[in-house]
Amino acid sequence: MRYISAMRSIALAVTPGMPIFDLAVPCHVFGTDRPGLPDPWYELRVCAIGPGGAEAGDPVAARSWFAAHTPYGTEELIAADTVIVPASADVRGDPPEELIAALREAHRRGARIVSLCSGAFTLAATGLLDGRTAATHWMYAALFAERYPAVRLDPSVLYVDHGDVLTGAGSTACIDVCLHLVREDYGTEAANTLARQLVAPAHRPGGQAQYIEAPLPERTDDSLAPLLHWAAERLHEPLTVADLARRAHTSPRTLARRFHAATGTTPLRWLQGQRIARARELLEGGDLPVDRIAELCGLGTAANLRRHFTRAVGVPPHDYRRAFRARETRLPAPPAIEERGPGRGPAFQLSGD
């Protein structure tokens, strides 16, 4: 548990175009005095950092027509106990040099550096993640691994904490990260109290693996896509590597080599992944018994499905269905509202006051 000062300071690094959700959650968690929680709480500093000469006091445009009020700047960010880097506006672009330099200096002075979602790209650009394991949104896993090969990416977890640096997964995982920070700073009781006030689980079961999609590749004449689609339509059958090789008119050894080059895994592991993906679809979309789902996915028995599903996804089938199944409850249509475009409604500002 980290004990830094009577009031812990948290700096939120704000750059143009950031997603509003990743800005709002830390502001809501760390910038609001709440009953039943330690007093003093956190001192939140919303800091303007980035290109274009952004300075303390300047409003910074976020996504979706929102603007963030930024009373603080680089100096306050560097001096904070913890620095949070929300998702970036463009994961394919280079992070602002001003922010990279500020994060390095803050870390040198002993600050804990935290990234949310694609903010891991910014944190990785500082070099602070080299040789370490990190998390980011699963949608950006391939791009992150390509851009930062010195970082070991784990796309299945909600966050990775090394003490001095912490990386979180995508979108709502920032709530999990914020609760973890409170748990580290103020203890389990404070984190659980906050979780109840947020109407959020104190510890979310499973990890990011339960949200990852596994689409089949596009069909091309010179690829394994036709074979993969053929196999995906026969998951209920006891397919073997020999079956796949015969279908591809090649030897099992050659198939294994081509398979690894195309998918990065072995034929059997790919089949297992597709069976788990099929089980997820059936759990989400209906009320079939688990033993029937096991048969349709080629996993045999309910016990076998539970074992492999829990190992791959992080939660058992029953819990997954409860969280993800399609709900058929019909709600009354909401009353019509007038849409407001830019300039037609009052401006909304996130404030760090």
Image (cartoon, rainbow, N blue to C red):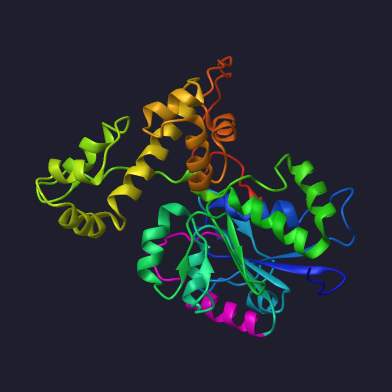
Q: Is residue 37 visible?
A: yes
Residue 116 falls in image quadrant: bottom right
Residue 130 spot, x, y in % from top left: 49, 77
Q: Residue at x 73, y 47 (%)?
A: 202
Q: Residue at x 48, y 36 (%)?
A: 304
Residue nearest the observer in this picture, 159 or 73? 159
The quarter of the rendered structure image containing the N terminus is: bottom right
Residue 15 falls in image quadrant: bottom right
Residue 238 spot, x, y in % from top left: 30, 34
Q: Residue at x 63, y 47 (%)?
A: 348
Residue 36 spot, x, y in % from top left: 89, 49
The reply, left or right, for residue 105 in relation to residue 64 is right
The reply, left or right, for residue 254 in relation to residue 94 is left
In the depicted structure, whether residue 285 falls above or below residue 116: above
Residue nearest the observer in this picture, 48 or 315? 315
Residue 69 on the magenta span: no
In the depicted structure, whether residue 309 falls above or below residue 17: above
Q: Is residue 342 visible?
A: no
Task: Report how many numbered discs are placed on residues in the image.
Answer: 0
Residue nearest the observer in this picture, 13 or 232? 232
Q: Residue at x 26, y 42 (%)?
A: 240
Residue 103 on the magenta span: yes
The quarter of the rendered structure image containing the C terminus is: bottom right
Span highlighted in magenta in the image:
85-108
Residue 164 falls in image quadrant: bottom right
Residue 58 spot, x, y in % from top left: 61, 65
Residue nearest the observer in this picture, 138 or 86? 138
